[in-house]
Each structure stands twice: as C-alpha cells, then as structure tokens.
Amino acid sequence: MYNPNFYKVQMGKEYMKDARYSLLLKDGTEVLPHQYMRIDFCQDGKHIICEEETGCSLLKLEML
C-alpha cells in the first residue's frame, strides 16, 4: 500500500540490514528521518508502521 502524498526513500541496498528509510512529503519536506529499518503504509492509507532497532511504532499520517 502507499499514500500518494508521501515518498518513502531508501538509503542503502539490503532491506532490513544496511538500508534505512525516511518519509518525505511530495514537496520534499522530510517528515521522518533516515533512521528506520522499514516503513510500511497500512491498508487504510492513514497509518504507517516504522521499525527501528529498538522496536516498532504505529503512526497516524495526519499527525506527521
């Protein structure tokens, strides 16, 4: 799933190992920094799951 108002940006090559993700608005404004091992949009398009070394978070997109 995705939300057309955001871009998920990957830095690094290998998923869940050296890759880190950030979230940008379409205008290029950084919403979440490049610290997440994974960022996934939920099916409702209104929430995302962010995974870091220390655990996961469920975030509501309208709060970002």
Image: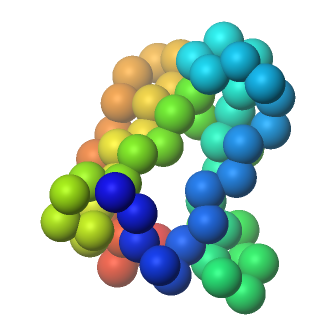
Q: Residue 26: percent from the left, percent from the top?
A: 66, 82
Residue at left 52%, top 34%?
A: 38
Q: Residue 27: percent from the left, percent from the top?
A: 73, 87
Above or below, comparing residue 63 to residue 17 in the picture: below
Q: Does the image show residue 4? A: yes
Side (left or right) of 38 relative to 41: right
Q: Does the image show residue 33? A: no
Camera-side residue of 35 and 20: 20
View extreme (bottom): residue: 27
Residue at left 47%, top 79%?
A: 4
Camera-side residue of 2 and 37: 2
Image quadrant for the N terminus?
A: bottom left
Side (left or right) of 55 relative to 20: left
Side (left or right) of 44 relative to 30: left
Label tally: 0
Above or below, comparing residue 26 to residue 12 in the picture: below
Residue at left 40%, top 45%?
A: 40
